[in-house]
Image (cartoon, rainbow, N blue to C red):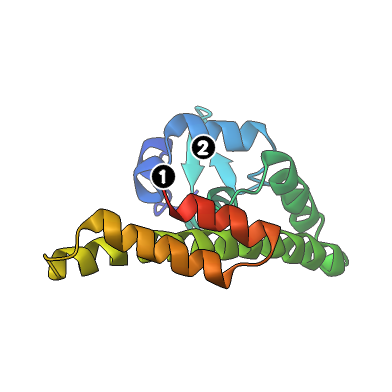
């Protein structure tokens, strides 16, 4: 066993995960054969394990379920010949992440628009914030004609 491996506590510090999460990932079959064991059965994590954990954390942080992560790990563990399925799984997840990002960007645009109303009103101290918001809401209502934009306009008044 190489001297450059890490204990589970060291791996937890390096990856930002808890020791419990590292054990859980192993129990769920996500770690493939990356985790070595000493004669006393203590876990040891090499550079490959740390890199793999880093990728797993990206999948999890972007909302991939443990079940889907397990499927991906199974495909990787099976070796060559299933790259098409691996790519399909990653592409599907990427599309889900992209849709969430698009939604968040839309939400952020609404927050920015609302904050701009307050900035403008505060910069022009003679215009009360409530008047500026009413003007913004009337302008948004005039631009909207579909039911979905009408609900957004109603939301903008809040």
Alpha carbons under labels 2 and 1: distance apart = 8 Å
Q: Foreground: 108 or 32? A: 108
Residue 125 appears left or right of 47: left
Q: Foreground: 57 or 26? A: 57
Say if 138 sits above or below 22 in the image. Answer: below
At x 44%, y 61%, the residue is 137
At x 43%, y 37%, the residue is 8
Residue 100 occupies quadrant: bottom right
Looking at the rendered structure, the secondary structure element under dot 1 is helix
Residue 56 drawn at (x, y percent): 58, 52
Residue 42 drawn at (x, y percent): 48, 31
Q: Foreground: 14 or 62? A: 62
Residue 109 drawn at (x, y percent): 45, 66
Say if 83 sits above or below 10 in the image. Answer: below
Residue 39 drawn at (x, y percent): 53, 32
Q: Which mark is residue 36?
A: none
Q: Earlier in the sequence, mark 2 or mark 1?
A: 1
Q: Is residue 98 visible?
A: yes
Residue 83 appears left or right of 39: right
Estimate how packed mark 1 is, as few (under 14), some (14 to 19) or many (20 or more) residues with alpha carbons within 10 Å.
many
Say if 104 sits above or below 7 in the image. Answer: below
Residue 61 appears left or right of 96: left
Estimate how packed mark 2 is, as few (under 14), some (14 to 19) or many (20 or more) residues with alpha carbons within 10 Å.
many
Looking at the rendered structure, the secondary structure element under dot 2 is helix
Q: Which mark is residue 22?
A: 2
Q: Mark 2 and 1 residues: CB-CB less than 8 Å, in contact?
A: yes
At x 11%, y 65%, the residue is 125
- Residue behind mark 1: 11
Count of numbered marks = 2
At x 69%, y 57%, the residue is 147
Q: Is residue 55 visible?
A: no
């Amino acid at each position: 066993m190489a001297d450059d491996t890490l204990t589970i506590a060291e791996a937890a510090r390096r990856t930002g995960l808890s020791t419990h999460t590292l054990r859980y990932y192993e129990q769920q079959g996500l770690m493939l054969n990356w985790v070595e064991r000493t004669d006393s059965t203590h876990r040891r994590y090499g550079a490959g394990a740390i890199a793999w954990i880093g990728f797993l954390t990206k999948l999890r942080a972007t909302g991939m379920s443990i079940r889907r992560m397990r499927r991906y790990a199974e495909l990787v563990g099976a070796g060559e010949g299933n790259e098409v399925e691996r790519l399909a799984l990653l592409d599907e997840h990427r599309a889900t992440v992209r849709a969430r990002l698009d939604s968040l960007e839309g939400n952020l645009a609404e927050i920015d628009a609302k904050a701009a109303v307050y900035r403008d009103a505060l910069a022009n101290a003679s215009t009360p914030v409530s008047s500026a918001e009413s003007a913004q809401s009337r302008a948004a209502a005039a631009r909207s004609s579909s039911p979905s934009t009408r609900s957004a306009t109603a939301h903008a008044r809040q």
